[in-house]
Image (cartoon, rainbow, N blue to C red):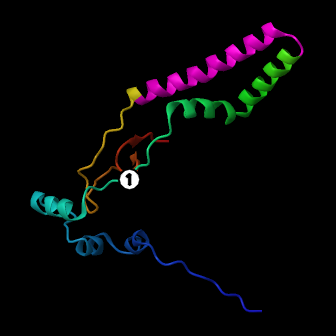
Amino acid sequence: MTMTTQTAAPTPSAAFARRTLEETAVQLETSTISGLTTLEANNRRARYGLNEFEVEDDEPIYLKFFKSFYENPLILLLLASAIVSLAMGQRDDAISITLAILIVVTGKASNRLVYCSDNPNPCNDNNDDDDMITAAIGVRFGSDLKEDLPTM
């Protein structure tokens, strides 16, 4: 019995991971000290476009709200409890359980909204593929450089 192994085609990032910093700079036609000149950065931006992803449209807010009900098993359990209470004639219990669920789900959505407004995500659309970014050891940031990540 012969085993065959398939090797995936190397990705561009894997190829750069095997190179030294100097080799990478030469390949990208830039400098490890000064990066690109403004003229060259503008030329590359005109040639390649901005360094950004195409983002699909967000789902509607009402869909996100209803998803928060069925994505959490505890909320589903409470909803089932409210239905059972209603079926057993305990209307007051069913109403109070339903109100508690609405308060929790709405509170979570409100907290997320407050967090997003307190922590804006500035776009760094001016970064090109070969811009040199210098960071101190231990500093964490998103791969798109749009947000700082907390240090663990």
Report the magenta residues as a range.
88-116
Q: Nearest the camera: 127 or 77?
A: 77
Place of residue 107 in the rendered image (x, y in percent of width and height, measured from the top left): 57, 20
Q: Quadrant of residue 12?
A: bottom left
* Mark 1 Cα-neighbour bin, 10 Å: few <14, some 14–19, many ≥20: few
* The residue positioned farthest toward the top in the image shown: 92
Q: On the picture, is 104 further left or further right than 145?
A: right
Q: Is the stretch drawn in magenta largely helix, strand or loop?
A: helix
Q: Residue furthest right?
A: 88
Can you give x and y, in whole percent of width and height, for residue 58 in the image?
Answer: 46, 41
* Residue 85, image x, y percentages: 84, 16
Q: Is residue 102 magenta?
A: yes
* Vertical position of residue 93 compared to residue 51: above or below: above
Q: Is residue 40 left or right of 49 when viewed as pictured?
A: left
In-front residue for pair 125/130: 125
Tell me which residue sits at (79%, 7%) in the image.
92
At label 1, the amino acid type is Glu
Name the residue rendered at 68%, 15% in the picture: 100
Residue underneath mark 1: 54
Percent position (x, y) of residue 98?
Answer: 71, 17
